[in-house]
């Protein structure tokens, strides 16, 4: 075996969990990025002399190994060409649409595949170098599906876990991929492969059984060389306490009240918070809301839609087209139904601080989460965590992973069924207080007892038990 590193717990993800900050005197420092994953894994990192392997987010940027917040960070360099072909290309224009029900057509380019392989090899080498003998390595997401196998070849001593944050498609769709066998074999390098939903784990098992030499025996896949691989659902969650703390902050509460006034104190505020992504069903939501106004079921004085659309993947063509479509739709709705000073849709193409986001959640009577396909959808869980007042209602697409857990308290909906979506939005607006309370209690009971820390613990316990 090659010489080993010293970290007994290694996380491998496309991005490092920090953002570069340049101080006034020109020095570079690093600030921990927002996000539950790093928060949940930080204590494990501290306890096990952990290291995090990932890209800084800037092309051609490869600082030497550094530490921040008690975490050892190992930067994997990506050239501008790697970013274009491995990240924007194969990850976000091939795998992302293929894994999200081909809502837009995936593009298959051999050069992108070559870049994906090459970059995955680089991540695997970096992980192999820092991992101590018999270390636990936890690999994240669709950008790095070849890493488990590449790493195992170099370091058979390691315990390897992989978690996919996005859906895993059924055979009919996955079979399109020219490199389907290689991706499945890549994942089979792990001991434990985690998915958001049980159905996704099932898709992976049958695909691996069909397209690789592994065979499914009971709840395990057995590889050609006799190794057992377990595929299972571990629905991801959020840092419940962080959202609850902000929601309880008097300043945030006051800000929520101000937001209500700023949008004209309507009877109902409907809220959407999504990355501007074609998977999120923003267009379906706008269409349903527009028809409710057109039909006169609601008036613009009565109800406004606040839509936060976070800028995302702006160099990928499908995202540029989507932005044009959404903004055309918003413009039409406001032209048709807005009044001076009171647009029908408040559209915000921007990122926000956590406190402002939570204020929005508190201001909303109805949270409208209508993805056409979504691995989990954390916003739905954030809404529930913020509502300790037991007010508000959640409209949730059955195509979001969150629907498996939140189906009892949410208003589940098929976003393709526009009439159904309209009816459901109306039902959520007109909910009686007692029913709202009852539903919100059910939702909160689940989310509060299933936070991100529990997710990390469940995954790592299952991995260590193998
Ligand atoms: P995403 O597709 O990014 O995640 P989501 O789960 O909703 O989707 O997470 C988005 C996060 O970004 C939330 O925490 C939200 O609060 C935050 N956010 C959104 N808009 C923001 C804004 N304008 N400013 C600041 N923050 C904003 C992928 C998968 C999901 C899966 C997660 C985690 O697509 O299905 O739930 O990973 O596994």
Image (cartoon, rainbow, N blue to C red):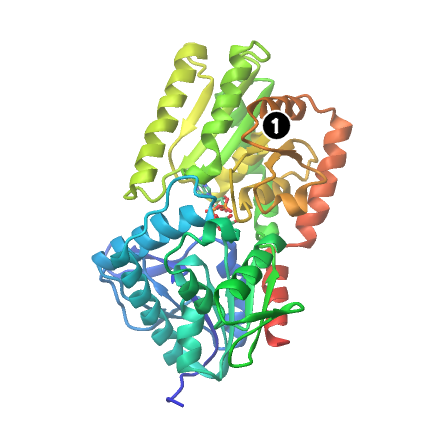
> Which one is in front, 153 or 464?
153
Q: Residue 199: image x %, image y %?
A: 61, 53
In the image, residue 124 sits, relative to residue 14, either above or below, namely: below
The residue lying at 25 percent from left, 53 percent from top is 84
In the image, residue 146 sits, relative to residue 401, either above or below, namely: below
The residue lying at 69 percent from left, 42 percent from top is 443
User: Dot 1, how many residues are within 10 Å of its Cα: few (below 14), some (14-19), or many (20+)?
Assistant: many
Judged left or right of residue 25, residue 371 is: right
> Which one is in front, 158 or 300?
158
Judged left or right of residue 21, residue 259 is: right
Q: Residue 141: image x %, image y %?
A: 45, 59
In the image, residue 337 sits, relative to residue 263, either above or below, namely: above
The residue lying at 59 percent from left, 26 percent from top is 421
Label 1: which secondary element: loop
The residue lying at 55 percent from left, 81 percent from top is 226
Q: Residue 93: image x %, image y %?
A: 34, 48
> Which one is in front, 168 or 3?
168
Where does the C terminus fall, quadrant-wise? bottom right
Residue 185 visible to the viewer = yes
Q: Which residue is mark 1?
A: 365
The answer as to whether callout 1 falls within 8 Å of ligand 1 is no
Count of numbered circles in the view = 1
Residue 167 visible to the viewer = no
């Amino acid at each position: 075996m090659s010489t080993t590193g010293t970290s007994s717990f290694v996380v491998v993800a496309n991005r490092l969990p920090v953002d570069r900050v340049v101080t006034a005197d020109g020095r570079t420092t690093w600030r921990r990025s927002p996000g539950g994953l790093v928060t949940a894994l930080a204590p494990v990192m501290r306890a096990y002399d952990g290291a995090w392997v990932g890209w800084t987010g800037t092309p051609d940027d490869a600082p030497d190994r550094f530490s921040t917040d008690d975490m050892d960070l190992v930067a994997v360099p990506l050239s501008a060409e790697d970013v274009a072909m491995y990240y924007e290309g194969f990850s976000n224009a091939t795998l992302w649409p293929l894994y999200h029900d081909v809502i837009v057509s995936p593009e298959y380019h051999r050069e992108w595949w070559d870049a994906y392989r090459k970059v995955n090899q680089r991540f695997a080498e970096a992980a192999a170098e820092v991992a101590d003998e018999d270390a636990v390595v936890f690999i994240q997401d669709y950008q790095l599906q070849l890493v488990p196998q590449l790493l195992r070849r170099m370091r058979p001593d390691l315990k390897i876990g992989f978690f996919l944050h996005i859906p895993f498609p059924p055979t009919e769709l996955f079979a399109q991929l020219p490199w389907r066998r290689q991706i499945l074999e890549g994942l089979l390098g792990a001991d434990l492969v985690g998915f958001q939903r049980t159905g996704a784990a099932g898709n992976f098992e049958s695909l691996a059984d069909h397209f690789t030499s592994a065979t499914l025996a009971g709840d395990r896949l057995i590889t050609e060389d006799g190794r057992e691989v377990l595929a299972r659902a571990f629905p991801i969650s959020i840092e419940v306490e962080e959202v609850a703390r902000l929601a309880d902050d008097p300043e945030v509460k006051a800000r929520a009240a101000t937001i209500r006034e700023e949008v004209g104190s309507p009877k109902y505020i409907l809220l959407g918070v999504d990355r501007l992504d074609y998977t999120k069903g923003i267009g379906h939501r706008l269409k349903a809301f527009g028809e409710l106004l057109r039909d006169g079921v609601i008036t613009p004085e009565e109800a406004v839609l606040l839509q936060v659309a976070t800028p995302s993947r702006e160099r990928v063509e499908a995202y540029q087209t989507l932005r044009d479509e959404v903004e055309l739709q918003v413009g039409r709705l406001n032209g048709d139904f807005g009044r001076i000073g009171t647009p029908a849709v408040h559209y915000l193409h921007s990122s926000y601080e956590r406190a402002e986001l939570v204020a929005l959640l508190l201001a909303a009577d109805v949270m409208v989460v209508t993805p056409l396909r979504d691995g989990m959808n954390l916003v739905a869980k954030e809404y529930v965590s913020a509502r300790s007042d037991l007010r508000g209602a959640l409209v949730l697409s059955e195509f979001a992973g969150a629907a498996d857990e939140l189906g009892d308290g949410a208003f589940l909906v098929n976003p393709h069924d526009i009439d159904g979506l309209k009816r459901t939005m109306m039902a959520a607006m007109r909910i009686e207080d007692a029913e709202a309370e009852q539903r919100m209690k059910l939702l909160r009971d689940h989310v509060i007892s299933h936070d991100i820390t529990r997710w990390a613990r469940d995954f790592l316990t299952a991995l260590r038990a193998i």
